[in-house]
Amino acid sequence: MTIIQTLGAVFIFAPFIAFILIFFAARKTLNRRAFEVAADFTTLLLFFAIPVMIYAIWNYEASAVVCFIAILLAIGFLIVEWKKTKEIKVLAYFRKTWRLYFLVLTFAYFIIWIAGFAFTVSEFLLDSF
């Protein structure tokens, strides 16, 4: 059980490792779709990783904020899709929304990572003087 917990913790704190592993594992069988499969799984990990990272760095619970932003993005994207095409294909909409989440969450992950690094370094430098 501790192996599963350790792997889960590694993938939560470093979802890009899961992305790389899934991409290379799926590349042999899925060829071009390997990136999509890796991105889909990593999106799920990022939904957990972002609030955990924010809590670990700033001690702030951000799960509700992440869910609220995800809902706002879905609503905004639905309005754009509805304006563009009057008939919405639900499965295609969900797939596009999930990919949008991947892009937004990956960007947020790296921004939080850089901000957390700067926060930790500045805290270390202020404590040492």
Image (tube, grey):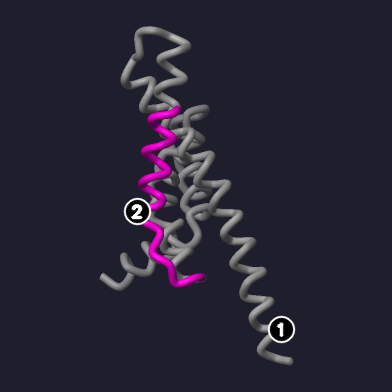
Observer-nearest of 75 and 105: 75
The disc, 1 or 2, on the residue closer to the chain's N-terminal end is 2
Residue on which disc 2 sits: 64
Residue at (42% x, 63% y) in the render: 52
Q: Is residue 71 magenta?
A: yes
Name the residue nearer the viewer: 62 or 32: 62
| In the image: residue 46, left or right of residue 107 | left
User: Which amino acid type is shown beneath numbered disc 2?
Assistant: Ala
Q: Residue at x 44, y 28 (%)?
A: 76
Q: Is residue 92 above or below residue 106?
A: above
Q: Is 44 situated above or below 36?
A: below
Q: Count residues near mark 2 (Cα–Cα under 10 Å), then give few for <14, some for 14-19, many for 20+.
A: few
Q: Position of residue 63 (x, y in %)?
A: 36, 56
Residue 5 pos. (x, y %)? 32, 68
Q: Which mark is residue 125?
A: 1
Circle 1 SS class: helix
Q: Quadrant of the N terminus?
A: bottom left
Is 106 situated above or below 87?
A: below
Q: Is residue 75 magenta?
A: yes
| Mark 1 in CB contact with mark 2 (< 8 angstroms) | no
Q: Kindly identify the amino acid type of the residue bearing the numbered disc 1.
A: Leu
Stretch in magenta: 58-76
**Residue found at x 36% / y 47%:** 67
10 Å crowding of disc 1: few (<14), some (14-19), many (20+)? few
Left or right relative to 45: residue 1: left
**Circle 2 — which element?**
helix
The CA distance from mark 1 to mark 2 is 32 Å
Residue found at the far right of this picture: 129
Picture quarter containing residue 92? Answer: top left
Image position, residue 25 (x, y; %): 46, 43
Q: Nearer the viewer, mark 1 or mark 2?
A: 2
